[in-house]
Image (tube, rainbow, N blue to C red):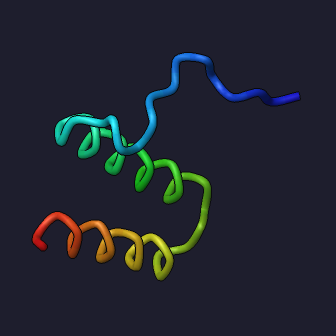
Amino acid sequence: SLTASKNIKPDHGLTFVEYMYTKNHFLTCIENAGWGNKLVDAFNWFFHTINNH
């Protein structure tokens, strides 16, 4: 069974550097998991839009 880590930091507690690292890791993971280019590109555009807001 899977359980949540007790060491997890809430999203609102992340520094910008931590956010950037986790965003890039998330994109790599969904690409490696075979989510498909269209969905990976959609998430990438979403994060790009947030970063440049």
User: On the rendered structure, is 2 left or right of 25?
Assistant: right
Of 39 and 18, which appears nearest the observer?
18
Q: Is residue 31 above or below residue 38?
A: above
Q: Residue at x 30, y 36 (%)?
A: 14
Residue 38 x %, y %: 47, 82
For the residue pair 38 and 42, the one nearer the viewer reads as 42
Q: Quadrant of residue 22?
A: top left
Q: Tell which residue pokes out farthest to the left in this image.
A: 52
Q: Residue at x 45, y 70 (%)?
A: 40
* Horizontal and vertical percent position of residue 17: 18, 37
In this rendering, the answer to whether 13 lies above or below 38 is: above
How many numbered callouts? 0
Residue projecting furthest to the front: 12
Locate the C terminus by quadrant: bottom left
* x 18%, y 42%: residue: 16
Q: Residue at x 59, y 67 (%)?
A: 35
Q: In front: 6, or 32? A: 6
Q: Residue furthest top?
A: 7
Which percent across, then down, holds residue 3?
76, 27
For the N terminus, the image quarter is: top right
Where, by quadrant of the figure, is residue 50 drawn?
A: bottom left
The picture places residue 33, in percent across and down from the top left corner, at 61, 54
User: With respect to residue 29, does 40 lie above or below?
Assistant: below
